[in-house]
Image (cartoon, rainbow, N blue to C red):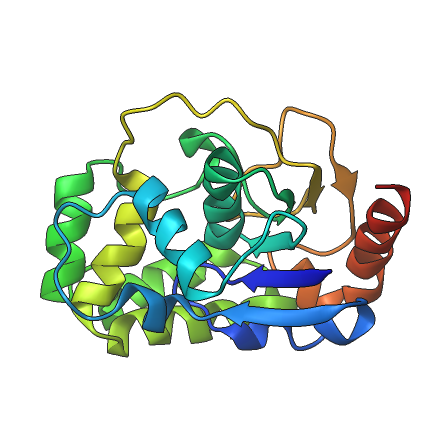
């Protein structure tokens, strides 16, 4: 069994540094910055991207997908393509669970491409709204990555969230892990494994997150 880790928007594979050593099996880390690339992909589709990841990382049905935030959203759609067991951490299966200050995707993409969306002014506003001192450094780093990263790749990441797909996704995560104090993604309406912390619970409370995942793996 391999565990495939997928990080969130603006983040890197380092977000799993505290959690991964506590989990069994072989570990594979998906780097969205590399996998999405810097080309402008106007017709990017999350389902097609999941198919790309399956080929790129040779993901088999027996592999377990662990996704944080955007990574969990990707894992959810990947299960529609291939019936892997998937675990979401601080993620969602409904678009309206993502707390984003703007909802018009055309404006989001235009602002991201121009640099306005993650400018110093926008960053100050977002940090003021964050109000989670224990993990503000992780959030700040993700914002800095989005501000300094290739604008096309940033838009490509955003497209995975906001661009609609033309099929009905009829699968469910095998395990949802969430902290109620998450102020980036609302906690699920469905049953979930509650852990302490906030959106970055996997960095501040890795043992609790690992325990939930370990119990699932033992029972499945």
**x and y, in percent, of residue 88 in the image:** 62, 46
141 sits left or right of 187 in the view = left
93 sits left or right of 188 in the view = left
In the image, residue 178 sits, relative to residue 122, either above or below, namely: above
* Identity of the residue drawn at 25% across and 69% down: 37
Q: In terms of depth relative to the viewer, which is nearer, 37 or 107?
A: 37
**x and y, in percent, of residue 43 in the image:** 15, 45
User: Which quadrant holds the N terminus?
Assistant: bottom right
**x and y, in percent, of residue 176 in the image:** 68, 40
180 sits left or right of 68 in the view = right
In the image, residue 155 sits, relative to residue 61, either above or below, namely: below
Q: Is residue 19 in view from this perspective?
A: no
Q: In which quarter of the image is residue 143?
A: bottom left
* Identity of the residue drawn at 87% across and 56% down: 211
User: Which quadrant holds the C terminus?
Assistant: top right
* Identity of the residue drawn at 17% across and 65% down: 152
Q: Quadrant of residue 177?
A: top right
In the image, residue 11 sits, relative to residue 130, either above or below, namely: below
38 sits left or right of 89 in the view = left
* Identity of the residue drawn at 52% across and 46% down: 75
Q: In terms of depth relative to the viewer, which is nearer, 76 or 128?
A: 76
In the image, residue 47 sits, relative to residue 151, either above or below, namely: above
Q: Quadrant of residue 119?
A: bottom left
Q: In terms of depth relative to the viewer, which is nearer, 173 or 121?
A: 173
**x and y, in percent, of residue 95 in the image:** 41, 33
Q: Is residue 32 in view from this perspective?
A: yes
């Amino acid at each position: 069994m391999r565990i495939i880790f997928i990080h969130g928007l603006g983040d890197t594979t380092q977000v799993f540094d505290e959690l991964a050593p506590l989990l069994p099996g072989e570990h594979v880390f998906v780097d969205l910055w590399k996998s999405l690339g810097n080309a402008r992909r106007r017709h990017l589709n999350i389902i097609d991207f999941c198919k790309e990841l399956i080929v790129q990382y040779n993901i088999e049905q027996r592999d377990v997908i662990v996704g944080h935030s955007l990574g969990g959203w990707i894992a959810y759609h990947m299960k529609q393509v291939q019936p892997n067991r998937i675990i979401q951490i601080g993620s969602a299966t409904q678009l309206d669970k993502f707390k984003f200050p703007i909802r018009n995707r055309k404006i989001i993409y235009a602002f991201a491409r121009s640099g306005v969306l993650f400018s110093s002014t926008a960053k100050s506003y977002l940090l003021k709204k964050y109000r989670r001192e224990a993990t503000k450094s992780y959030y700040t780093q993700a914002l800095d990555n989005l501000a300094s990263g290739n604008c096309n790749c940033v838009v490509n990441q955003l497209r995975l969230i906001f661009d609609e797909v033309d099929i009905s996704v009829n699968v469910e995560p095998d395990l949802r892990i969430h902290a109620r104090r998450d102020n980036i993604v609302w906690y699920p309406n469905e049953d979930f494994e509650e852990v302490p912390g906030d959106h970055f619970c996997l960095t501040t409370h890795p043992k609790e997150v690992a325990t939930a995942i370990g119990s699932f793996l033992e029972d499945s």
